[in-house]
Image: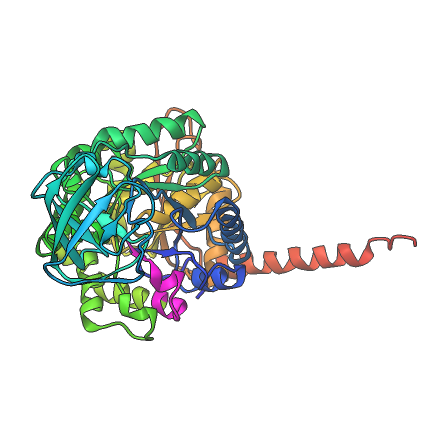
Amino acid sequence: MSRPSSSEAFTKIVCTVGPACDTVERLVTLIEHGADIFRINSAHGDRESHQRILANIREASAKVKYPVGVLLDLAGPKLRLGTLLTDPLFCEVGRELTFIRGEAAEREDQLTCSYVKLIDELVVGNRVMLADGTVALVVEEVTKNWARCRVTSGGEIRSRQGINLPGVALSLSSMRRSDVDNAIWGAQAGIDFISLSFVRTAEDVRSLKNLLASYDSKALVIAKIEKREALDQLEGIVDAADGVMVARGDLGVEIDVAETPVAQKRIIRVCREKFKPVIVATQMLESMHHNRRPTRAEASDVANAILDGADACMLSGETAIGEYPVEAVDTMNRIMVHTERELIDTIPQETHRELNRVHPITAAVANGAATIADQIHAKMIVIATRSGGTAWVKSNQRSHTLTIGASDNEETLQRMSLFWGIKPLRVSQLDDGDELFDEICRWGCRTGMVAPGDRLVFVTGNSVLHNVHNLLVVHSVPQDACRILLEADAAAAAAATAARQSAPTPQS
């Protein structure tokens, strides 16, 4: 489909980039099918591969002529097993396993950990979860050099798999040295969003923001909620962050899996109250790693996230290593489109709140635009914005009027890729209102998005007239506008062709 399109979902789609989709050609296809943001997972690959992926994303976006965002996901202080002597190792219930210091096990019943202070911080009674919670241990004895555990839930483990310690307060920093290095690279490379893993406090978020600010980065910081401590400090974390990710993989291990659905709803609710975009992630269409169709439960999971108020849903292995990455994006878009028809009745519109990042007059004008557009049956709302602030407000209204976020600032266009319902559109300038109206009308006529007689609601900035904050203008497309504008396009193209043909041929 040509983008932006009236047939695509309002909820945004985040796709993880991996071997299944990291070429320019495949990225172009994913954008054309509905991808809005591409995630680079810093836990996999090296700097060279990350740079190559970023360059491919930007090239693909330029080819499609549609701005997409890039999310750099910092790995964070993820605890992992070291090298097992027997790999894989089956752990039967009741078996004793012992954590020792070092990087490699010397006996089959020994385990090591990437976190060197693990043994110092474990106490008797702590739970240790391995292999995404499949295998569970309980600590029975701790000495200076080892911690003996007993298996309470059996299964298979492998070297380098993750370790979760529900309820255990560890002293490790929220960012490792490699995370700091990756964040600095992201800041210098112009990454649009940077997500921080295993956030525990608002201070973790502020630390990353301060680091990015020192490199003059405008990247939005996304706090990943995946620990019990983060749930306990949720409101402060949401206040500090620019957006939030419900990282259900580790969260579902750190807390009881039965608590996860309610925790997801609470996180989304708090983000909605505070006007912060929220991404729901992990195993959304998991079966599509190897199947062209998702399960009914997975389709319901995506739909419920949208009905709860999620701004975006994320595909992980489905697009990174799955066999059907394009089909996964198509499927998610279809589920979103069908579900969004119910949003107008299920999510109350919060039009009276003020945002500290946007002037209250700007917020009021954005709110008024949606009301006017609804009353006059406008074909679309066009928000002309340099910073994206007005579009940020508009996205929280969950209005079903097609909304274009028009900007001549590339960073703003890419950041708007996360805003619910906002379709970013690159325009040549924002200062001349008449020229902007003509450019939007020309684009709309060319793409079939508007027709003569359609009403467009424009929200423009304060540079069109002196001593005003924002303008809200209702513009009707003249009956002969499309014909005149398209004829002008054709004449310009013909003149350009004639000029090329009449140009002197270089002498050999």
Q: Is residue 375 visible?
A: no
| Residue 368 in the figure: left or right of residue 404 | left
Give the camera-side residue of 463 and 148. 148
Image spot of residue 116 (x, y percent): 28, 37
Q: Is residue 247 above or below residue 154?
A: above
Image spot of residue 94 (x, y percent): 10, 59
Give the camera-side residue of 162 and 461. 162
Whether residue 34 appears in magenta in the rendering, the answer is no
Rendered image coloring scheme: rainbow
Image spot of residue 134 (x, y percent): 18, 59
Give the camera-side residue of 144 and 472. 144
Taking the spot 35% from the left edge, 36% from the top edge, the residue there is: 471
Q: Residue 214: which quarter of the image?
A: top left
Taking the spot 44% from the left edge, 28% from the top edge, the residue there is: 216
The extreme front residue here reads: 107
The extreme right residue here reads: 508
Image spot of residue 210 (x, y percent): 35, 26
Provide the residue span drawn in magenta. Answer: 312-329
Taking the spot 22% from the left edge, 46% from the top edge, the residue there is: 99
| Quadrant into which the N terminus falls | bottom left
Q: Residue 406: which quarter of the image?
A: top left
| Residue 460 in the figure: left or right of residue 101 | right
Taking the spot 41% from the left edge, 61% from the top edge, the residue there is: 449
Whether residue 319 appears in magenta in the rendering, the answer is yes
Q: Is residue 21 visible?
A: yes
Q: Is residue 273 above or below residue 468?
A: below
| Residue 424 in the figure: left or right of residue 294 | right
